[in-house]
Image (cartoon, rainbow, N blue to C red):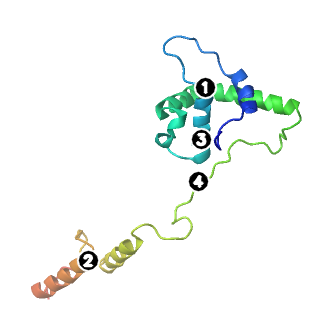
């Protein structure tokens, strides 16, 4: 048995709560293997395509995960497990919750810079310097462009405001 898989005792509880198959079409994949695949993805946070082959086709596992979400299987299972745990006195309704996910914050949220921040800062400084140029001027905002523009303005005798002299 692998780390994220159901024990025999856990599977006996869940198996009784699963909907009965209509029995038409191809034979259904082993439900326990599918459940173990779903739990592997949910526990690791890996993409569905990275599901190990021992759980079968990732498309099959993904299909059943979505099917059970749409038809309410997850909700019914959760409700049945809550009732069972409550009857055994093993659930505290004051502290109980499902969502235990965590989302990694971006570097910028933690006070760090974004990718390419040094390049953007350089461009922003040049843009600020040239903000007093002509109203409809939208030329490149690189250091080289600023040098070339200043040189061309000096050579033509035009000031930054556009007047000669």
Extreme-left residue of the structure: 156
| Comes first in the chain, label 2 or label 1 | 1
* Residue identified by numbered label 3: 40
- Judging from the image, what secondary structure is the residue with disc 3 in? helix
Tag in front: 2 or 1: 1
Could you say where residue 40 lies in the image, as x and y percent from the top left?
A: 59, 41
Nearer mark to the viewer, of 3 and 2? 3
Tell me what residue is drawn at x 65 percent, y 29 percent: 74
On screen, residue 112 above or below 74:
below
Q: Is residue 118 above or below residue 46?
A: below
Choose the circle earlier in sequence order: 1 or 4.
1
Dot in front, 2 or 4: 4
Q: Is residue 161 left or right of residue 152?
A: right
Q: CA separation, marks 2 and 4?
A: 44 Å
Q: Earlier in the sequence, mark 3 or mark 1?
A: 1
Label 2 vs 4, first from the N-terminus: 4
Q: Which residue position is annotated with label 2?
A: 133
């Amino acid at each position: 048995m692998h780390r994220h898989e159901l024990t025999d005792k856990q599977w006996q509880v869940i198996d009784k709560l699963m909907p009965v198959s209509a029995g038409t079409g191809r034979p259904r994949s082993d439900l326990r293997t599918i459940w173990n695949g779903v739990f592997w993805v949910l526990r690791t946070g890996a993409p569905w395509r990275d599901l190990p082959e021992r759980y079968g086709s990732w498309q099959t596992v993904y299909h059943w995960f979505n099917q059970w979400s749409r038809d309410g299987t997850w909700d019914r299972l959760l409700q049945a497990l809550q009732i069972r745990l409550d009857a055994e006195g093993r659930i505290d309704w004051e502290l109980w919750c499902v969502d235990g996910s965590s989302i990694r914050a971006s570097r910028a949220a933690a006070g760090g810079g974004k990718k390419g921040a040094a390049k953007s800062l350089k461009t922003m400084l040049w843009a600020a310097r040239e903000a007093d140029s002509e109203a409809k001027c939208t030329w490149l905002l690189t250091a080289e462009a600023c040098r070339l523009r200043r040189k061309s303005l000096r050579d033509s005798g035009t000031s930054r405001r556009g007047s000669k002299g």
